[in-house]
Image: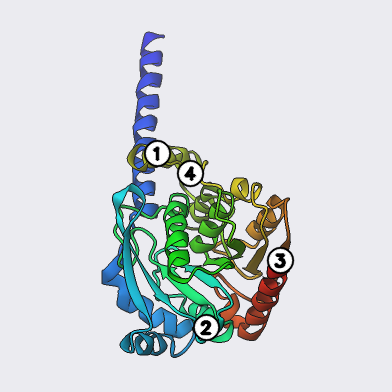
Amino acid sequence: MKRFFNLVAIIAAAIAVSSCLAGKYMANYALCYEPHGVADIERTRHKADSLCPGSTAWYDSLKTVGLLKDTTIVGFNDFKVHACYVPAADPANAEGTAIVVHGYSDNHFVFLYLVRMYRDEFNYNVLFPDLQYHGYSEGNHAQMGWHDRFDVEKWIEVAHGIWHDKFMVLHGVSMGGATVMMTSGDDLPEYVRAFVEDCGYSSVVMQFNNNRKQSFSFIPPDVLQSASLVTKKRYGWGFWEASSLKQLAKCERPMLFIHGDADDFVPVSHVYKNYEAKVHGYKELWVAPGAVHANSYAKHPQEYTQRVRDFLAKAKTL
Protein backbone atom coordinates (compact mmCIF):
# COMPACT_ATOMS: atom_id res chain seq x y z
CA MET A 1 0.00 0.00 0.00
CA LYS A 2 2.84 2.39 0.86
CA ARG A 3 4.42 1.72 -2.54
CA PHE A 4 1.11 2.47 -4.21
CA PHE A 5 0.81 5.88 -2.50
CA ASN A 6 4.44 6.64 -3.32
CA LEU A 7 3.75 5.81 -6.97
CA VAL A 8 0.65 8.05 -6.97
CA ALA A 9 2.70 10.87 -5.46
CA ILE A 10 5.41 10.47 -8.10
CA ILE A 11 2.85 10.45 -10.93
CA ALA A 12 1.08 13.51 -9.47
CA ALA A 13 4.40 15.35 -9.18
CA ALA A 14 5.31 14.44 -12.75
CA ILE A 15 1.95 15.72 -14.00
CA ALA A 16 2.36 18.93 -12.02
CA VAL A 17 5.84 19.51 -13.43
CA SER A 18 4.63 18.73 -16.97
CA SER A 19 1.70 21.10 -16.54
CA CYS A 20 4.02 23.84 -15.27
CA LEU A 21 6.40 23.39 -18.19
CA ALA A 22 3.51 23.33 -20.65
CA GLY A 23 2.13 26.48 -19.03
CA LYS A 24 5.46 28.27 -19.43
CA TYR A 25 5.66 27.17 -23.04
CA MET A 26 2.11 28.35 -23.77
CA ALA A 27 2.71 31.72 -22.08
CA ASN A 28 5.91 32.25 -24.09
CA TYR A 29 4.29 31.06 -27.32
CA ALA A 30 1.25 33.33 -26.97
CA LEU A 31 2.79 36.47 -25.49
CA CYS A 32 6.43 36.55 -26.64
CA TYR A 33 6.14 35.50 -30.27
CA GLU A 34 8.70 36.31 -32.96
CA PRO A 35 9.17 38.20 -35.17
CA HIS A 36 7.79 41.42 -33.80
CA GLY A 37 8.53 45.09 -33.57
CA VAL A 38 11.00 46.99 -35.68
CA ALA A 39 12.37 43.84 -37.33
CA ASP A 40 8.90 43.11 -38.67
CA ILE A 41 8.06 46.57 -40.02
CA GLU A 42 8.59 45.67 -43.69
CA ARG A 43 6.21 42.71 -43.52
CA THR A 44 3.52 44.87 -42.01
CA ARG A 45 4.05 47.63 -44.58
CA HIS A 46 3.30 45.01 -47.22
CA LYS A 47 0.27 43.85 -45.26
CA ALA A 48 -1.06 47.42 -45.11
CA ASP A 49 -0.92 47.66 -48.90
CA SER A 50 -2.58 44.26 -49.30
CA LEU A 51 -5.53 45.47 -47.21
CA CYS A 52 -5.76 48.79 -49.05
CA PRO A 53 -3.46 49.43 -52.05
CA GLY A 54 -1.36 52.57 -51.83
CA SER A 55 -1.54 52.87 -48.05
CA THR A 56 2.18 53.08 -47.39
CA ALA A 57 2.76 55.50 -50.29
CA TRP A 58 0.04 57.70 -48.76
CA TYR A 59 1.72 57.41 -45.36
CA ASP A 60 5.17 58.23 -46.78
CA SER A 61 3.87 61.23 -48.72
CA LEU A 62 2.29 62.78 -45.62
CA LYS A 63 5.47 62.16 -43.64
CA THR A 64 7.63 63.74 -46.34
CA VAL A 65 5.71 67.02 -46.18
CA GLY A 66 5.71 67.01 -42.38
CA LEU A 67 1.99 66.43 -41.80
CA LEU A 68 2.41 62.96 -40.31
CA LYS A 69 4.54 62.99 -37.18
CA ASP A 70 5.96 60.58 -34.60
CA THR A 71 5.83 60.94 -30.85
CA THR A 72 6.95 58.87 -27.88
CA ILE A 73 5.78 58.89 -24.27
CA VAL A 74 6.49 56.85 -21.15
CA GLY A 75 3.73 54.31 -20.91
CA PHE A 76 2.60 51.61 -18.51
CA ASN A 77 5.40 50.05 -16.43
CA ASP A 78 7.76 52.78 -17.67
CA PHE A 79 8.19 51.38 -21.17
CA LYS A 80 8.53 53.94 -23.95
CA VAL A 81 5.62 53.74 -26.36
CA HIS A 82 5.35 55.22 -29.84
CA ALA A 83 2.53 56.66 -31.92
CA CYS A 84 2.02 58.56 -35.16
CA TYR A 85 -0.47 61.36 -35.58
CA VAL A 86 -1.81 63.34 -38.51
CA PRO A 87 -4.23 66.28 -38.71
CA ALA A 88 -7.54 66.17 -40.53
CA ALA A 89 -7.54 66.90 -44.26
CA ASP A 90 -9.25 70.22 -43.47
CA PRO A 91 -7.93 71.01 -39.98
CA ALA A 92 -9.99 74.15 -39.47
CA ASN A 93 -13.19 72.14 -39.84
CA ALA A 94 -12.14 68.84 -38.21
CA GLU A 95 -15.04 66.66 -37.10
CA GLY A 96 -13.17 65.22 -34.13
CA THR A 97 -10.31 62.92 -33.17
CA ALA A 98 -9.93 59.19 -33.83
CA ILE A 99 -7.50 56.82 -32.13
CA VAL A 100 -6.89 53.71 -34.24
CA VAL A 101 -5.57 50.61 -32.42
CA HIS A 102 -3.86 47.73 -34.25
CA GLY A 103 -4.06 43.99 -33.65
CA TYR A 104 -1.97 41.08 -32.41
CA SER A 105 1.57 40.93 -33.88
CA ASP A 106 0.85 44.02 -36.01
CA ASN A 107 1.80 47.69 -35.59
CA HIS A 108 0.68 51.17 -36.56
CA PHE A 109 1.23 50.53 -40.28
CA VAL A 110 -1.24 47.70 -40.73
CA PHE A 111 -4.55 49.52 -40.40
CA LEU A 112 -3.63 52.59 -42.40
CA TYR A 113 -6.91 52.09 -44.26
CA LEU A 114 -8.69 53.21 -41.10
CA VAL A 115 -6.36 56.18 -40.65
CA ARG A 116 -7.06 57.20 -44.25
CA MET A 117 -10.79 56.67 -43.79
CA TYR A 118 -10.95 58.89 -40.72
CA ARG A 119 -8.64 61.58 -42.09
CA ASP A 120 -9.51 61.77 -45.78
CA GLU A 121 -13.18 60.77 -45.78
CA PHE A 122 -14.43 61.82 -42.33
CA ASN A 123 -12.06 64.79 -41.79
CA TYR A 124 -10.86 63.60 -38.37
CA ASN A 125 -7.54 64.16 -36.67
CA VAL A 126 -5.99 60.73 -36.12
CA LEU A 127 -3.50 59.25 -33.66
CA PHE A 128 -2.43 55.64 -34.16
CA PRO A 129 -0.10 54.00 -31.62
CA ASP A 130 2.14 50.96 -31.47
CA LEU A 131 1.05 48.86 -28.52
CA GLN A 132 3.76 47.58 -26.21
CA TYR A 133 6.01 44.88 -27.73
CA HIS A 134 4.93 46.02 -31.20
CA GLY A 135 6.37 48.38 -33.80
CA TYR A 136 8.58 51.09 -32.34
CA SER A 137 7.25 50.67 -28.81
CA GLU A 138 9.16 48.96 -26.03
CA GLY A 139 7.70 46.13 -23.96
CA ASN A 140 8.42 42.62 -22.77
CA HIS A 141 5.27 40.83 -23.98
CA ALA A 142 1.98 41.24 -25.82
CA GLN A 143 -0.48 42.51 -23.22
CA MET A 144 -3.55 41.32 -25.17
CA GLY A 145 -5.32 44.62 -24.60
CA TRP A 146 -5.63 44.29 -20.85
CA HIS A 147 -2.73 46.49 -19.78
CA ASP A 148 -2.61 48.13 -23.21
CA ARG A 149 -5.70 50.04 -22.16
CA PHE A 150 -3.58 52.04 -19.72
CA ASP A 151 -1.36 53.24 -22.58
CA VAL A 152 -4.43 54.02 -24.71
CA GLU A 153 -5.72 56.16 -21.86
CA LYS A 154 -2.46 58.11 -21.96
CA TRP A 155 -2.75 58.49 -25.72
CA ILE A 156 -6.27 59.86 -25.24
CA GLU A 157 -4.79 62.69 -23.19
CA VAL A 158 -1.97 63.25 -25.69
CA ALA A 159 -4.37 63.45 -28.64
CA HIS A 160 -6.66 65.83 -26.78
CA GLY A 161 -3.68 67.98 -25.88
CA ILE A 162 -2.80 68.30 -29.57
CA TRP A 163 -6.23 69.02 -31.05
CA HIS A 164 -8.61 69.83 -28.15
CA ASP A 165 -11.58 68.25 -29.93
CA LYS A 166 -14.82 67.69 -28.04
CA PHE A 167 -15.56 64.41 -29.83
CA MET A 168 -13.20 61.42 -29.79
CA VAL A 169 -13.73 57.88 -31.05
CA LEU A 170 -11.58 54.83 -30.33
CA HIS A 171 -11.49 52.28 -33.18
CA GLY A 172 -9.64 48.97 -32.90
CA VAL A 173 -9.31 45.75 -34.92
CA SER A 174 -8.75 42.24 -33.50
CA MET A 175 -6.61 42.64 -30.36
CA GLY A 176 -7.10 46.36 -30.95
CA GLY A 177 -10.84 45.78 -30.84
CA ALA A 178 -10.47 43.97 -27.53
CA THR A 179 -8.27 46.84 -26.29
CA VAL A 180 -11.01 49.33 -27.17
CA MET A 181 -13.66 47.26 -25.38
CA MET A 182 -11.44 46.84 -22.33
CA THR A 183 -10.79 50.59 -22.29
CA SER A 184 -14.49 51.40 -22.63
CA GLY A 185 -15.29 50.23 -19.11
CA ASP A 186 -12.81 52.55 -17.42
CA ASP A 187 -13.36 56.10 -16.19
CA LEU A 188 -12.64 58.18 -19.29
CA PRO A 189 -12.78 61.89 -20.14
CA GLU A 190 -16.18 63.12 -21.28
CA TYR A 191 -14.85 63.98 -24.75
CA VAL A 192 -14.34 60.24 -25.45
CA ARG A 193 -17.76 59.81 -26.98
CA ALA A 194 -17.78 56.60 -29.04
CA PHE A 195 -16.13 53.24 -29.69
CA VAL A 196 -15.83 50.97 -32.74
CA GLU A 197 -14.60 47.43 -32.18
CA ASP A 198 -13.88 45.18 -35.13
CA CYS A 199 -13.52 41.40 -34.53
CA GLY A 200 -12.29 41.69 -30.94
CA TYR A 201 -12.39 38.70 -28.60
CA SER A 202 -14.66 38.43 -25.56
CA SER A 203 -11.83 37.55 -23.19
CA VAL A 204 -8.23 36.44 -23.35
CA VAL A 205 -8.99 33.01 -21.92
CA MET A 206 -11.76 32.40 -24.48
CA GLN A 207 -9.45 33.41 -27.31
CA PHE A 208 -6.51 31.33 -26.12
CA ASN A 209 -8.78 28.35 -25.57
CA ASN A 210 -10.01 28.67 -29.14
CA ASN A 211 -6.41 28.86 -30.37
CA ARG A 212 -5.57 25.79 -28.25
CA LYS A 213 -8.39 23.81 -29.89
CA GLN A 214 -7.26 24.86 -33.37
CA SER A 215 -3.50 24.33 -33.03
CA PHE A 216 -2.88 22.31 -29.87
CA SER A 217 -5.96 20.13 -29.45
CA PHE A 218 -3.85 17.44 -27.74
CA ILE A 219 -3.11 19.85 -24.87
CA PRO A 220 -5.73 19.78 -22.08
CA PRO A 221 -7.49 23.06 -21.23
CA ASP A 222 -6.03 22.98 -17.72
CA VAL A 223 -2.73 24.14 -19.21
CA LEU A 224 -4.31 27.57 -19.71
CA GLN A 225 -4.60 27.88 -15.94
CA SER A 226 -0.89 27.15 -15.59
CA ALA A 227 -0.04 29.62 -18.38
CA SER A 228 -2.21 32.24 -16.70
CA LEU A 229 -0.37 31.75 -13.40
CA VAL A 230 2.97 32.14 -15.20
CA THR A 231 1.70 35.35 -16.82
CA LYS A 232 0.43 36.65 -13.49
CA LYS A 233 3.78 36.06 -11.83
CA ARG A 234 5.82 37.56 -14.68
CA TYR A 235 3.63 40.42 -15.82
CA GLY A 236 1.03 41.09 -13.16
CA TRP A 237 -2.15 39.96 -14.93
CA GLY A 238 -3.95 36.71 -15.63
CA PHE A 239 -6.03 35.39 -18.51
CA TRP A 240 -9.31 35.24 -16.60
CA GLU A 241 -9.27 38.85 -15.47
CA ALA A 242 -8.59 40.17 -18.99
CA SER A 243 -12.22 40.32 -20.05
CA SER A 244 -13.89 42.48 -22.66
CA LEU A 245 -17.27 41.30 -21.34
CA LYS A 246 -16.72 42.63 -17.83
CA GLN A 247 -15.56 45.98 -19.14
CA LEU A 248 -18.43 46.25 -21.63
CA ALA A 249 -20.90 45.78 -18.77
CA LYS A 250 -19.67 49.11 -17.40
CA CYS A 251 -19.66 50.99 -20.72
CA GLU A 252 -22.40 53.59 -21.15
CA ARG A 253 -21.17 55.32 -24.32
CA PRO A 254 -22.11 54.40 -27.91
CA MET A 255 -20.37 51.43 -29.50
CA LEU A 256 -20.42 49.85 -32.95
CA PHE A 257 -19.60 46.13 -33.06
CA ILE A 258 -18.26 44.68 -36.35
CA HIS A 259 -17.36 41.08 -37.13
CA GLY A 260 -17.00 38.89 -40.21
CA ASP A 261 -19.33 35.91 -40.34
CA ALA A 262 -16.52 33.74 -41.81
CA ASP A 263 -14.06 34.57 -39.03
CA ASP A 264 -12.65 31.38 -37.53
CA PHE A 265 -9.69 32.95 -35.71
CA VAL A 266 -11.93 34.96 -33.40
CA PRO A 267 -15.23 33.11 -34.00
CA VAL A 268 -18.25 35.24 -34.80
CA SER A 269 -19.88 33.95 -31.60
CA HIS A 270 -17.63 36.40 -29.72
CA VAL A 271 -19.35 39.45 -31.19
CA TYR A 272 -22.77 38.29 -30.05
CA LYS A 273 -21.41 37.80 -26.52
CA ASN A 274 -19.81 41.24 -26.67
CA TYR A 275 -22.96 42.90 -27.97
CA GLU A 276 -25.11 41.35 -25.26
CA ALA A 277 -22.60 42.27 -22.55
CA LYS A 278 -23.06 45.97 -23.25
CA VAL A 279 -26.29 46.62 -21.38
CA HIS A 280 -26.04 50.41 -21.05
CA GLY A 281 -26.18 53.04 -23.76
CA TYR A 282 -26.51 53.00 -27.52
CA LYS A 283 -25.07 50.12 -29.56
CA GLU A 284 -25.06 48.80 -33.12
CA LEU A 285 -24.03 45.46 -34.60
CA TRP A 286 -22.91 44.66 -38.14
CA VAL A 287 -21.89 41.12 -39.12
CA ALA A 288 -20.08 41.42 -42.46
CA PRO A 289 -21.03 38.65 -44.93
CA GLY A 290 -18.19 36.46 -46.14
CA ALA A 291 -15.50 38.32 -44.20
CA VAL A 292 -12.75 36.36 -42.47
CA HIS A 293 -10.74 37.71 -39.55
CA ALA A 294 -9.93 41.43 -39.74
CA ASN A 295 -11.22 41.43 -43.32
CA SER A 296 -14.55 43.27 -43.09
CA TYR A 297 -13.22 46.50 -44.59
CA ALA A 298 -11.30 44.74 -47.37
CA LYS A 299 -14.39 42.70 -48.21
CA HIS A 300 -16.89 45.56 -48.03
CA PRO A 301 -14.98 48.88 -48.07
CA GLN A 302 -17.91 51.09 -49.06
CA GLU A 303 -20.41 49.55 -46.64
CA TYR A 304 -17.85 49.52 -43.83
CA THR A 305 -17.13 53.21 -44.38
CA GLN A 306 -20.80 54.15 -44.55
CA ARG A 307 -21.73 52.18 -41.44
CA VAL A 308 -18.96 53.83 -39.42
CA ARG A 309 -19.91 57.25 -40.83
CA ASP A 310 -23.58 56.77 -39.91
CA PHE A 311 -22.69 55.47 -36.45
CA LEU A 312 -20.51 58.48 -35.70
CA ALA A 313 -23.24 60.84 -36.85
CA LYS A 314 -25.66 59.10 -34.48
CA ALA A 315 -23.17 59.11 -31.61
CA LYS A 316 -22.75 62.88 -31.93
CA THR A 317 -26.45 63.37 -31.24
CA LEU A 318 -26.45 61.33 -28.02
The image shows residue 154 at horizontal and vertical percentages of: 42, 56
Residue 284 is left or right of residue 95, and the answer is right
Residue at left offset 54%, top offset 57%: 178
- Identify residue for label 3: 285
The image shows residue 265 at horizontal and vertical percentages of: 54, 63
Marked residue nearer the N-terminal end (2 or 1): 2
In the image, is residue 241 above or below residue 38?
above
Tag in front: 4 or 2: 2
The amino acid pointed to by label 3 is Leu
- Identify residue for label 2: 92
Question: What is the distance, in whole Å, between disc 2 and disc 1 at their CAs?
Answer: 47 Å
Tag in front: 4 or 3: 3
The residue carrying pointer 1 sits among few (fewer than 14), some (14 to 19) or many (20 or more) residues within 10 Å by Cα, namely few
Question: What is the distance, in whole Å, between disc 4 and disc 3 at their CAs?
Answer: 26 Å
Question: What is the distance, in whole Å, between disc 4 and disc 2 at their CAs?
Answer: 44 Å
Residue 169 is left or right of residue 231, and the answer is right
Q: Answer yes or no: do the residues labelled 3 and 2 have beta carbons within 8 Å?
A: no
Marked residue nearer the N-terminal end (3 or 2): 2
Tell me the quarter of the image containing the C terminus.
bottom right
The amino acid pointed to by label 4 is Phe
Marked residue nearer the N-terminal end (4 or 2): 2
The image shows residue 214 at horizontal and vertical percentages of: 51, 58
Q: Quadrant of residue 311?
A: bottom right
- Identify residue for label 4: 239
Residue at left offset 60%, top offset 76%: 296
- Identify residue for label 1: 232
The amino acid pointed to by label 1 is Lys
Marked residue nearer the N-terminal end (3 or 1): 1
